[in-house]
Image (cartoon, rainbow, N blue to C red):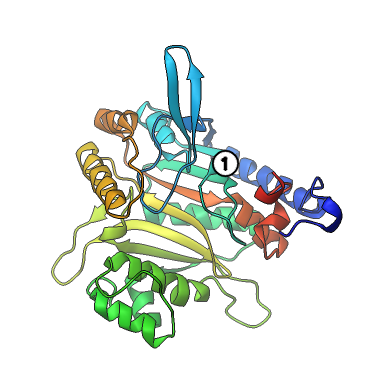
Amino acid sequence: MAPQAGGATWRPAAGLDALLKRAQILARIRAFFAERGVLEVETPVLAAAPVSDPHLQALSCRLDAPGGERRLFLQTSPEYAMKRLLAAGSGPIYQVVRAFRDGEVSPLHNPEFTMLEWYRPGFDHHSLMDEMDGLLFATLGAEPAERLAYGDVFRHRVGLDPHRAEGADLAAAAAARGIEVVGMDAASPKDDWLHLLMSHVVEPTLGLADDEGEPPRPTFLYDYPASQAALARVRRGQGVEPAVAERFEVYVAGVELANGFHELADADEQRRRFVGDLEERRQRGLPAVPVDEHLLAALAHGLPDCAGVALGVDRLVMLASSAEHIGDVLAFPVDRA
């Protein structure tokens, strides 16, 4: 939000109604998991290693500690630490936590934000979608979501098979829709083109009302390209079927709300993905980051078969409040911090 005239930026950006709505939603979240026997936990916001994902940039700080100065990172998600708890036998867990991402300022982004993350041993991504339906009903009164495979919706909206199309095909599809791109060409990584077309062509059509006057119905998009697995398992293709990442994203009214995985439990494969991320960071001119050896040791010890999901609480409050800017539901967004 723009600062108020007269230098009154000491005042909260969000009105009392939005702050009350936030408190109500947080209470409903905690009641939802209490009814299901899911344990609320806390993990550090500061850690020795951030995520390696080239698309997420962590804020860092230096700690003056006994034994010398240490570099620590504000976490973009509590995922790594929560998986350590799961490997230690915690059972189903959830957390409402402050998370931080550098460079993310927009109507839907604040560098400091509230995240809900939970993990369910014994669930795959489809079982977790079932539970997500229940949470969206408890917090938004939403109807059960429609469920669409990534490949199906991409073919329908863009006219190309995302699993088989080449970068040149995707670049041509963007150009045909008048999408102007700076710093990309047909030789750019295929996933960059997939992300671009998804954000500009597909996402705005997801999670909308079926009929005029009806409330938005959530959309779950699942089974992403294997190259976008992140920390999800990959289901190998059979016959003409492509390999896919067992993950899903949740959209309401065209807004991406949550991202879930059938979690990767193979420590060797996770290390290979970390190494791949670090190489991609090098190629993109991004700083190298340390690998989280604690997470790798936990996976080697044994992560139970589980699924997990991270949800943006501020966006959930935006949807519940019909707000158009994240600053409308935050007491003090970054421009008033």
Q: Residue at x 43, y 23 (%)?
A: 70
Q: Is residue 183 above or below residue 246?
A: below
Q: Is residue 205 visible?
A: yes
Quadrant holding the C terminus? top right
Tally of marks: 1
25 sits left or right of 155 in the view: right
Residue occupying the far bottom of the picture: 176
Local SS, label 1: helix
Give the residue displayed 52% in from the left and 65% down from the top: 251
Q: Residue at x 51, y 47 (%)?
A: 101
| Residue 26, x across and y down, in percent | 66, 44
> Looking at this rendering, what residue extends furthest in the left direction?
239
Q: Residue at x 15, y 65 (%)?
A: 238
Image quadrant where residue 182 sits? bottom left
Nearer the observer, 14 or 126: 14
Q: Is residue 220 above or below residue 35?
A: below
Residue ranking furthest to the top: 66
Q: Is residue 179 above or below residue 215?
A: below
In the picture as drawn, the residue positioned furthest to the right comes out as: 6
At label 1, the amino acid type is Phe
Which residue is identified by label 1?
33
* Residue 249 position in % (x across, y down): 44, 60
Could you say which quadrant of the image residue 224 lies in?
bottom left
Vertically, is 261 above or below 225?
above
Q: Nearer the viewer, residue 275 or 252?
A: 275
Using residue 21 as the reference point, say whether residue 199 is left or right of it: left
Q: Position of residue 325 (x, y in %)?
A: 67, 62
